[in-house]
Amino acid sequence: MSLATRNGTGPVEAPVAPPKVVRQRRTRPGLLGLAVLLIALGGLGAAFAVTSVRATGSYLAVARPVEVGRQLSPADLVPVQVAGGQGLKPVPAGRLDDVVGKRAAVSLTPGTLLTMAQLTDDPLLGPGQQQLALGLGPAEVPARELHPGDKVLLVSTPDDDDTGPAATATRFEATVIDTATGQSDTEIVLYLALAVRDVPAVVALSAQKRIAVVLTEAA
């Protein structure tokens, strides 16, 4: 490029502008490491999701309330599909036959998964106790429903042939183990745990129809 001077002399070469230098952006090692970390976490999340799906299985859940000490029946349980249930150690649905007949060691709530730790094979009989069965009529049962673990009091009633002053009633403490329907639809069989020393007297009173049952404490 040339410019003309005012006095008509020859062209004079103008100074040439230096070229612009474009600086290259530097890559920060920290940002690169963060990107790699995010990609790795994304892969782990996808792997966890796939593992959870693969861990889905069929387990036993409680279908209705079960009181402490009551034996489980098939109607008390229902199979459910659960993802990732291994950590909870629930009972697989295929083991239904293994748990039916076992007693509830704790109260079982509907909608919860069943675990073997909630069940027991041990009877409700304590040391120095024996089991006794009483056949009662509807009016002789102290509550509409009695449950395992309920505390009852067995009270002797006067003899019908006794015309003298009323004798002092004898009392025996007992614990309900189970209930069942008797030979007739109106009879209720009450299975009780009571002290060994009280069994002969209670058996004699029961044979004479001279015993009353009083509920003292619900389980």
Image (cartoon, helix red, strand yellow):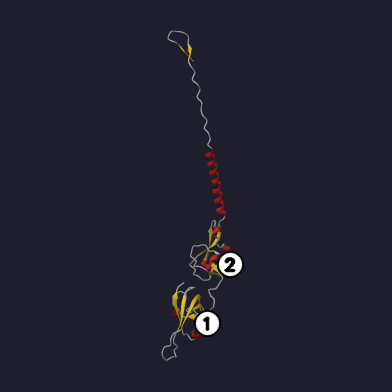
Q: Residue furthest bottom?
A: 163
**Residue 30: x, y in percent?**
53, 39
Q: Is residue 38 above or below residue 70?
A: above
Kind of residue sitting beneath label 1:
Arg
Of callouts 2 and 1, which one flags the residue occurring earlier in the amino acid sequence?
Answer: 2
Q: Secondary structure at mark 2?
A: helix
- Taking depth in this image into account, of 136 and 43 the one nearest to the observer is 43
Q: Is residue 178 above or below residue 54?
A: below
Spatial separation of the CA atoms under disc 2 and disc 1 = 36 Å
Label 2 or label 1, whichever lies nearer to me, is 1
Q: Is residue 159 left or right of residue 86?
A: left
Does residue 41 appear in this view?
yes
> Residue 197: which numbered mark, if any?
1
Q: Residue furthest left?
A: 165
Q: Is residue 135 above or below residue 47?
A: below
Kind of residue sitting beneath label 2:
Asp
Residue drawn where x is 54% and y is 41% of the image = 33
**Residue 52: x, y in percent?**
55, 53
Residue drawn where x is 54% and y is 46% of the image = 41
Residue drawn where x is 58% and y is 67% of the image = 98
Decide: few, some or many residues near mark 1? Use Cα within 10 Å; few <14, some 14-19, many ≥20. few
Residue at numbered disc 2: 98
